[in-house]
Amino acid sequence: MVGEKQQNNVSKLSFEEAIKKLTQIVNKIESGETPLQDSLQHYEKGMALIKHCRAILQRAEKRIEKISEPEEKPQEGTNGK
């Protein structure tokens, strides 16, 4: 499992930094030159990076939805009668 320290390091990364690190990990694993144990560790870190990126994207999506919501306007001509 990914250690707490590693998760904390991941959570401090910007989206762009996390994607860059994830790309590096994928390249290392795909090269086939990394020992199995190292590949597993890279995979675990990659999964933590993916989770972090998804969380950032979800927050951005919610923010966009909030910005895009039409403002509620009081209906004209109603005075409570």
Image: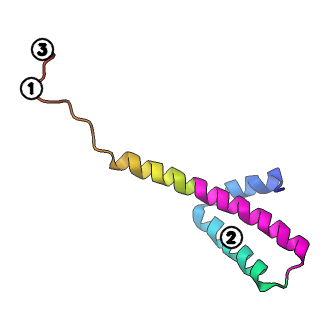
The amino acid beneath tag 2 is: Leu
- State yes or no: discs 1 and 3 in contact (Cβ < 8 Å): no
Q: What residue type is disc 3 on?
A: Lys
Question: How far separated are the C-alphas under marks 1 and 3?
Answer: 10 Å
Query: Which residue is tagged 1?
Result: 77
- Looking at the rendering, the stretch of residues picked out in magenta corresponds to 34-55
Q: What's the residue at 27%, 40% (across, down)?
A: 71
Where is the C terminus found, in terms of image quarters? top left
Residue 29 vs 72, above or below: the answer is below
- Element type at mark 2: helix
In the rendered image, the residue lying farthest to the top is 81
Rounded to the nearest angstrom, the CA distance separating label 3 from label 2 is 61 Å
Q: Which residue is mark 2?
A: 22
**Magenta span dominant secondary structure:** helix
Q: Quadrant of residue 73?
A: top left
Q: Position of residue 41 (x, y in %)?
A: 84, 66
Q: Is residue 3 left or right of residue 20?
A: right
- Residue sitting at 83 percent across and 54 percent down? 3
- Give me the disc on residue 81: 3
Secondary structure state at the residue bearing disc 1:
loop
| Secondary structure beneath label 3 | loop
Q: Nearer the viewer, residue 32 or 57?
A: 32
Q: Relative to 13, is 80 on the left or the right?
A: left
Q: Residue at x 9, y 26 (%)?
A: 77
Q: Position of residue 52 (x, y in %)?
A: 65, 56
- Amino acid type, residue under disc 1 in the picture: Gly
Residue 31 occupies quadrant: bottom right
Mark 3 or mark 2: whose residue is earlier in sequence: 2
Determine the residue positioned at 72% across, 62% down.
47
> In this rendering, would 40 be left or right of 73?
right
**Crowdedness near tag 1: few (<14), some (14–19) or many (≥20) residues, C-alpha within 10 Å:** few
